[in-house]
Amino acid sequence: IRARLTPQTAHEAMTTARRYGGTDAAAASIVDRALPEDAVRSTALDLAASLAGKAGNTLGTIKSRLYTEVLTTLRDATNPLG
């Protein structure tokens, strides 16, 4: 949660169990965008198509560097709860 959210949003989400609707989640940067239900599939396909050329090692490297702390914690078999 801390890797993706601002400290304020993470605090509110975790301590209050606030539920975020699509518009509020987008405003808090919990999601990248909020769409009407009938636009989700087509938008997802368009996004996937635009990223298809970036898939593979390059995208994996980018994500692993963005989330190094999270991945290290998840891979630590000696302390699975961090």
Image (spheres, rainbow, N blue to C red):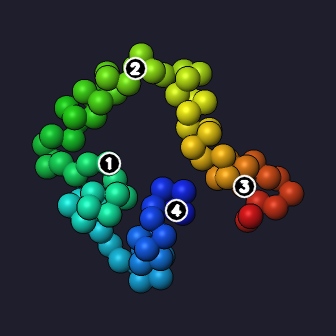
Q: Give SS at disc 4.
A: loop
Q: Mark 2: which amino acid?
A: Ala
Q: Give SS at disc 3.
A: helix
Taking 28 as reference, is 34 above or below it? above
Q: Mark 1: which amino acid?
A: Asp
Q: Give SS at disc 1.
A: loop
Q: Position of residue 22 (x, y in %)?
A: 23, 59
Q: Give how far apart the Cα atoms at labels 3 and 2 are.
A: 29 Å
Which of the marked residues, 4 or 1, is nearer the chain's N terminus? 4
- Crowd tier of the residue under label 3, counting other residues whose Cα lies within 10 Å: few below 14, some 14–19, many 20 or above: some
Taking 35 as reference, is 39 above or below it? above
Q: Mark 4: which amino acid?
A: Ile
| Residue 81, numbered label | none
| Residue 52, numbered label | 2
For label 1, the residue is: 32
Q: Give how far apart the Cα atoms at labels 4 and 1 are.
A: 15 Å
Q: Mark 3: which amino acid?
A: Thr
Residue situated furthest top in the rendering: 53
Which of the marked residues, 2 or 4, is nearer the chain's N terminus? 4
Taking 23 as reference, is 47 above or below it? above
Instruction: Please give left or right for residue 67 compared with residue 22 in the image.
Output: right
Q: Give how far apart the Cα atoms at labels 2 and 1 are.
A: 18 Å
Which of the marked residues, 3 or 4, is nearer the chain's N terminus? 4
Query: Which residue lies at the image location 73% right of the left edge and 65% below the top edge?
Result: 81
For label 3, the residue is: 73
Q: Give how far apart the Cα atoms at labels 1 and 3 are.
A: 25 Å
Query: Which residue lies at the image location 56% right of the left edge and 33% below the top edge?
Result: 62
For label 4, the residue is: 1
Residue 47 visible in the displayed image? yes
